[in-house]
Structures are given as structure tokens and as C-alpha cells.
Amino acid sequence: MRATNFNTRNDTYRKLLGNGLTYRVPRFQRDYSWGDEEWEDLWLDILGTLDPDGETGHYMGYLVLQTKDDKQFDIIDGQQRLTTLSILVLAALRQLKTLMDQGRDAERVRQRLEGLRQTYIGYLDPVTLVPRSKLTLNRNNDDYYQTYLVPLADSLPRRGFKASEHGLRKAFEWFERRIHDHVNTAPDPGIAVARLVDEMSDRLFFTVITVDDELNAYKVFETLNSRGVRLSATDLLKNYLFSILHREGQHERELRALDDRWEQVVGRLGAESLPDFLRVHWISRRSFVRQSELFKTIRGQVADRQDVFRLLQEMESDVDAYLALTQPDASEWTPDLRKDARCLRLFGVRQPLPLLMAAHRALPAARFASLLRCVVAMSFRYNVICNYQTSEQERTYHAEAARVARAEHRTDREILEALRPVYPSDEQFRSSFTGKTMSLKGRSRRILRYILCELERQASGLHLDYEDAAITLEHICPLNPADGWPQFTDEEIDTFTSRLGNILLLERRPNRDIGNAEYPDKRSAYAGSAYRTTQNVAEQHAEWSPDRIESRQAAMARVATGVWRIPQLG
């Protein structure tokens, strides 16, 4: 991104609202959604800055704006925060209005009310008495905001409104109560209200990023790492697609129907996951695109009403498969398919997803199941054991996804043959497995349980669930052994204890009982285990040493080569 396409600065709330600047929530941006928890957090943060012993300021995070003239700004990220602050100011003005109505220093209170209104809210046209607001909300919320909140209506209607409009009302009433309680005991409540707004405005500050078009806004989102930014990237995509329909004069009823369909997709995925889904979806049907180029690509290829309808329909068609692959436990797939999808998620492998989505559309169910099973074996070899670079793997999977989408490959055999470059040979796999070490931290612990459970299934026929809490991992030579392990030097303990050959499955209770015991005591516990692979250690190894670890791991590697093999690829 060129430096001229955006600028960054830190601004207080007062500076944001000054100098005649106006802000607009894009027409198809998400509705207002904050509730009690967010209001309470904001209020406590504000009070913390007002306390003489508190913070001198409070950071409100990133605010991403888009503008052509540096006078009117579209709020790309930050609409919930700016809307809530505006409602808080309006609640303060309502408190001043109440003081006026009660005749409590009415003229001074009126002057304060009008001063604060013009600074933070806007002004009333003296002829039409129509509010000219500094803030305009989206198409679902602006009417309620301008009609009832900005004019400080004596009563706020409660019936016949959308949930988000009720949210605006509830926010107003919530802050009105808090402000009343805050200033009620002050010697001069009017001064207390004005001081609250004034000091708040100087002590709340944002990092403001201003961009000149949607593409640069999306690039900004891709460089920031926060949940709110991810949500806004989703909003930006929606705003662009629906602005096409709005330009072409679609009826409001149709726009609402499409809005509902969009929200159903987003609701199922979670808004922060939609950019990831959309990229996988796009690659599975069209062409490879990097996440940073996704919005630019969509903007270049989705240009009219027909394109928008097609994209939305295809997204709806693909969302089930994507969720089944990424959240398999909640899917309606068969148990075998769910198991294989769980494995991919366990491995942390996403490169095959576009191909699998394309294949899910193109192949019969049995052939897709076979392909998914093969991709699991391929990913285990390539990513988990051999730990090869993923760049070649990504190129291969994405190229094959394009071929499947173009119907150039129509069978799982053709697809597998094209994937041969990212299938490590038996020799490569066996060599890497023989020297493999794994820690017990994070994902590695679960993968290690998976490996040992699969090897146990091969040895005994037991189908174990690697997530079962009753199954524990036992280091034969302990990670921190006491006396009784003279066959290991200190260096060998560091080198060999995390090797796969030194780790086995053991039931929870005997594992706890033997602790860091010497090998003869451990061997007795292993002999009594229900797991065949654990019994084998007791039967085949009268003592335990680095040579024994290497010998056992080489034997495990030979078995593993057969377990994770794709017969069609040799």
C-alpha cells in the first residue's frame, strides 16, 4: 500500500467531532449491537479517567475511516464505539433538558445544552427545526436515531421496532440513569453534566486510520490483528456487494431478503471467520487468491447484480461443506467423515480445504470419502512427520482445486495422481518418523495421542479416541528422572526422552502410581496394561536405554508407514 493512500494519527473524541466534520455509518453496515456489558465497560473506563487518582486518558482502539474530501467520513471500523459515545452525549443533554424543565438555572443550562449539542451532535435548522447531525447511522438505525434520540424526544416509543432500534433506546436509557446518579448530588448538576462530557471528550482517544477507498481499508484490516477488525472486514465485503444492488435500483424488499440471506451465512460461520471461508470458497470455484488480495479480486470480478446473486448463492451452497471440514463435531456428516475432518483440524492443515470443497461438489459421496481419507494420510506424512514447507503443498492443492472446478479431473484417482508431488515416499516418511521428537505442549500433545492410538488400533484392533481423558501419555525414561537411570547420560536424557520411541499409552491410574519409578517397576505396570503396544514394551525390553528407544521407534516407523499409506500412490 502506498503511503499516500492512508494516514494515521491519534485524536481525542473532541478533535474527531470538531471543525464541522461529519461521520456516516455505511448503509449496509451491521446494525447497532452493543449491550449492558459493553456499556458498563465504557462507563467504568470513563469514570476511571475522571477520578483524580485515575488514568489521565483511556485508549479506545483503532478507528478506520474512509473519505474523499477530509470532511465527510464513512466509518469502516468503529461504528459501535462512536454510536455509543454519541448516545452517551445525548443522554447527558437529556439530563440538562430535564434540569431546564424543572427551572433549575434554566438559562445557563440551556446555554450549556446548546453548546454541547453543536460541538458533539450537530445543530437544529432554525427554519425547519430538522436536526443536522454530525453522525448518520445505517439504513436500519438512522431513522430511530434522528427521529427520537437526536431531538431528545420526551418519550421513546417501544413498539414496532427492530431489535437494534430497541438497543439504541436501551443504551440511551442506560446512560441516562448512570449520568443522573453521577451528577444528582453535585452542588450544580448542570455544571457536573457539562464537565462530564467535556472531560470525557478530552480523555478518550483513538488511533485514527483514514483511507481513500474500500480496497485500502481492506488492506488495513489485513494488517491489524484484532477481532473487531476481522468483523469489519466482513462488513466491508457486505457493503461493497450490496452497494452494487443499491446502485442498480433494487427494491428495498429484495435488499432486505438478500440481507437476511447474507446474515444467515455470516451467523453460521461467525463474522470473524467469513473472510477465511470466502477465500477458500473463491479458490475452490475460481482461482487462487491471497487473503490480502481477496477484496481487490472480488471487486474486480463481481461488478453487477447477476454477479452478486451468483456469489451469494454459491456461498450458501458451500457453507455446509466448509463448516463440516472446519467444525466437524457439529456437522451431520457420517462418523468416518467427521473423524477424518477432525484429523485435518488436529494437524492444523488448511491447504487442502479448497480442493476438498471442490471435490465435495464434484464427486459421488463414496469417492469423496475416499479422497478425504487419502488427504488425511498425505497431510500426516507431509505436515506432521516430515514437516516440509507448505508453499509447494499449497500450490499443488490450489492448482488441483482449479482443475476440479473446471471439470478437468472427474475422479478421485485422477486427483490423487495430481497430488503425488506432495505425498512423501515410504522411505522419506519412515526416515522422518524414525527420528521424530514431540513435546507435550499444545497441539503436539494431542497429535502424539492420535499417533499412539492409531498404532494401538493397528496392533490390537482397539478403536481408541485420542481425546479420551482416561488415556494418558507415559514417558518410559522420565523427563526429569531421579536416581535409577544410569544407562542415560544427562545429554541423552535431553535428546531421547521426547522421542516417539520413549512414549507409550497408559491408563490414568497406573501412570499416576508409577510416577518417576525405575524401569523394572514401570515394566510391571506396562505388562498389566490393556494396550497391546504397551504390553509389547514389557515383553520385548528387559531394560531401557537409548538403543532400546531407537530400536522401538524404528519398529513403530515401519508400522506407521503402512498405517498412513495411500495404496494408489505406492
Image (cartoon, helix red, strand yellow):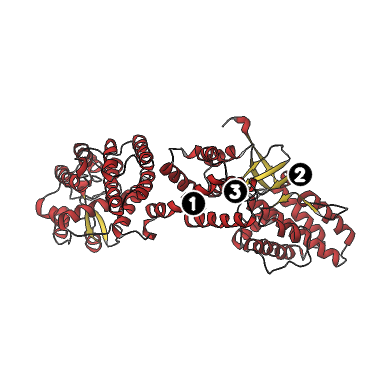
* Cα–Cα span, label 1 and label 2: 44 Å
Q: In this figure, which residue is indicated by the disc labeled 1?
A: 313
Q: In this figure, which residue is indicated by the disc labeled 2?
A: 18
Callout 1, which amino acid?
Answer: Gln
Furthest-bottom residue in view? 159
Q: In this figure, which residue is indicated by the disc labeled 3?
A: 242
Q: Secondary structure at mark 1?
A: helix
Residue 111, visible in the rendered structure: yes
In the foreground, 381 or 394 = 394
**Of pointers 1 and 2, the one earlier in the residue sequence:** 2
Of the two numbered discs 1 and 2 in the rendering, the one whose residue sits closer to the viewer: 1
* Cα–Cα span, label 3 and label 1: 14 Å
Quarter of the picture containing the N terminus is top right
Furthest-right residue in view? 107
At 39% from the left and 53% from the top, the residue drawn is: 321
Kindly check if marks 3 and 1 are in contact, taking CB atoms under 8 A apart as contact: no
How far from the left and from the top, in percent, is residue 339? Answer: 30, 56
At 23% from the left and 52% from the top, the residue drawn is: 452
Q: Secondary structure at mark 3?
A: helix
**Of pointers 3 and 2, the one earlier in the residue sequence:** 2
**Of pointers 3 and 1, the one earlier in the residue sequence:** 3
